[in-house]
């Protein structure tokens, strides 16, 4: 059994994926992982309330307080390094950071994307835009992907994917909700558990899982 790993969750909004992780941890589903820090990119977001309710330390690192992406990235990397963080999870974090964060946490940053990468991903594909594009294309399945974050948008090694059926009468909102409930909230905690139990290796931009 590997030792306990400290997780930081980065948020910019309501924190539904943060809540899914908190609930999974309460059920003992994050393996050796423990969420010890939540960092918000702006004050007053509901995700900070979720952290407080769960007894997790919440901090605000507001992008507007820094004059450049580099200065912000350094502050973010320093903050998480000082807190002894082992794994960083992006849960609707909409602020750009640079290579300083990737270098401080190589292959240790996870993101969940609400589509089956490489479909409907990359620059501009976030939130409802993803589901609008999927419905406009008329796909019959969509889903979610948990991947390791690299400097190239949505291009990092894929850890887990789960498909979700698209219904003929779906709106972007109904599809978003179904993908959250049936995919995101299941595979994000699962990927965190695999990471925290040292079951993930990355070779040639591919993830190999030892269960």
Image: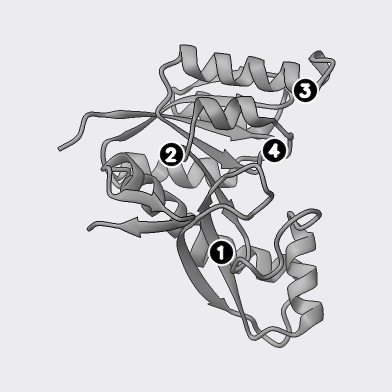
Question: Mark 4 packing: few (<14 Cα in 10 Å), some, or many (20+)?
Answer: some
Residue 105 locus on image (x, y percent): 49, 30
Q: Are marks 4 and 1 in contact (CB under 8 Å)?
A: no
The residue that appears at 73% across and 39% down in the rendered structure is 94
> Label 2, on which residue?
22
* Marks 4, 1: nearer the viewer: 1
Q: Secondary structure at mark 4?
A: loop
The residue that appears at 39% across and 45% down in the rendered structure is 192
> Label 1, on which residue?
144
Q: Secondary structure at mark 1?
A: strand
**For marks 4 and 2 on the same chain, the one whose residue lies earlier in the sequence:** 4
**For marks 3 and 2 on the same chain, the one whose residue lies earlier in the sequence:** 2
**For marks 4 and 1 on the same chain, the one whose residue lies earlier in the sequence:** 4
Q: CA distance from mark 3 to mark 4?
A: 14 Å
**For marks 1 and 3 on the same chain, the one whose residue lies earlier in the sequence:** 3
Q: Can the viewer see residue 50?
A: no
> Label 4, on which residue?
13
**Of the numbered discs in the image, which one, if any, rests on residue 63?**
3
Q: CA distance from mark 4 to mark 2?
A: 16 Å
Q: Is residue 162 left or right of residue 137?
A: left
Q: CA distance from mark 3 to mark 2?
A: 25 Å
The vertical placement of 75 against 198, above or below, is above
Q: Are marks 1 and 2 in contact (CB under 8 Å)?
A: no
The residue that appears at 20% across and 34% down in the rendered structure is 2
Question: Mark 1 packing: few (<14 Cα in 10 Å), some, or many (20+)?
Answer: many
């Amino acid at each position: 059994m590997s030792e306990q790993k400290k997780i930081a969750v980065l948020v910019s909004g309501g924190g539904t994926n943060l809540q899914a992780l908190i609930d999974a941890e309460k059920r003992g589903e994050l393996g050796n992982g423990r969420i010890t820090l939540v960092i918000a990119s702006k004050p007053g977001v509901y995700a900070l309330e979720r952290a407080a309710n769960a007894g997790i330390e919440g901090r605000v690192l507001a992008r507007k307080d820094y004059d450049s992406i580099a200065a912000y990235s350094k502050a973010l990397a320093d903050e998480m390094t000082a807190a002894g963080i082992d794994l960083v999870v992006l849960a609707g974090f909409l602020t750009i950071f640079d290579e300083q964060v990737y270098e401080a946490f190589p292959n240790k940053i996870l993101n969940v994307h609400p589509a089956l990468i490489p479909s409907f991903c990359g620059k501009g594909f976030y939130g409802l835009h993803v589901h609008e594009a999927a419905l406009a294309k008329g796909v019959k399945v969509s889903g979610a992907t948990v991947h390791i974050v690299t400097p190239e948008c949505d291009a990092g090694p894929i850890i887990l994917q789960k498909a979700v059926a698209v219904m003929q009468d779906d709106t972007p909102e109904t599809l978003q909700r179904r993908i959250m409930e049936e995919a995101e909230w299941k595979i994000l905690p699962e990927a965190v558990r695999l990471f925290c139990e040292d079951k993930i290796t990355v070779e040639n931009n591919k993830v190999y899982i030892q269960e």
